[in-house]
Image (tube, rainbow, N blue to C red):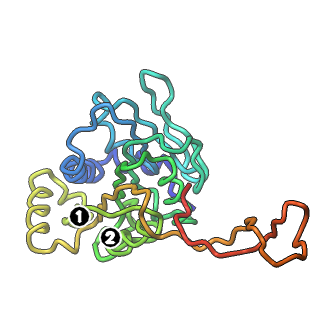
Amino acid sequence: MRQSVQKLEQFYASRLGGTVQSMVSRRLHSLWPDLQDCDILGYGYAVPYLHGYQDSAHSIIYAMPEDQGVARQISERGNASVLTPDHYLPFAPGVFDKVLVVHGLEEAPRLLALLAELWRVMKPEGRIVIIAANRAGLWARSDKTPFGAGRPFSRNQLSSALKSSGFVPLVRSGALYGPPIGKLSGPRMAGGFEKFGETVWPGFSGLVLVEAVKRLYAGGGQKQKRRVLRPGFGGTRALGASSGMQSREYERTGETHE
């Protein structure tokens, strides 16, 4: 069961949640400094992190899992948020230039199915950034924040899952090196923790960030059996109807994404 959208909204309205938004946005904007005229999808609860791109992006759509609930978001075109099943997105293939996933993977019941759907709705060479709790960090061990729910990931685990779904990981980074304690979440102190952690303990961040690109030729496809018709050359005896064709099964290995 996912955390409710009300709980997520309450967390980001708190002092600790504001610090998380500031520190993570700092890292995200180093990866995506400008999204001018891009079509963007935020999956999970990405509202605090995509708000800063509202004026430059062509469109921003928020897809929120049905077990979480939806927070209504309004744009110039009307409602910009939609409630979706965990592994099905109601969008046509190849729609989005960028996808941001926050509070979306840790509690997903079908992780690879969800990643395959995100791959499907992205444009070729589109970029995805996934932000998730780091299994080696302190934030995944605290029930006081939303990052303590569900399964945490290491950088390698997240990269491996992306590769299995047809993505090519490009950049791996981290954020939130300070402890999940409200009294230690002031801007100056949090900034000091970030600088120290990035230099001394880069692998022990509270969150992991992985950016990947959608490549149509990326590996990771599964073997599929398909029934095809091939011409039969069995001598004078007819092998089928007048078309002279017979049906054979063969294994074909290739990209599973269409």
Horizontal and vertical percent position of residue 139? 31, 67
Q: Nearer the viewer, residue 160 or 235?
A: 235
Q: Residue at x 53, y 68 (%)?
A: 254
Mark 1, residues whose alpha carbon is within 10 Å: few (<14), some, or many (≥20)?
A: many
Residue 208's x, y, as percent?
29, 65
On screen, residue 31 versus residue 195, left or right, reads right
- Res. 174 mark: 1
Q: Residue at x 48, y 44 (%)?
A: 94
Mark 2 or 1, nearer chain start: 2
In the displayed structure image, the side of residue 36 where residue 255 appears, left or right: right
Is 153 left or right of 178, judged from the image as shown?
right
Q: Are marks 2 and 1 in contact (CB under 8 Å)?
A: yes
Q: Position of residue 231 (x, y in %)?
A: 75, 68
Secondary structure beneath disc 1?
strand
Q: Is residue 255 above or below residue 76?
A: below
- SS at circle 2: loop
Q: Which mark is residue 134?
A: 2
Mark 2–mark 1 Cα distance, whole angstroms, equals: 8 Å
Note whether 101 is above or below 235 in the view shown: above
Of the 4 image quadrants, the one containing the N terminus is bottom right
Amino acid tagged 1: Gly
Q: Residue at position x 90%, y 61% from top? A: 242
Kind of residue at disc 2: Asn
Kindly identify the residue that appears in the image at 73 percent across and 65 percent down.
Answer: 228
Q: Nearer the viewer, residue 117 or 12?
A: 117
What is the quadrant of the C terminus in the image?
bottom right
Residue 12 location (% of width, % of height): 34, 47
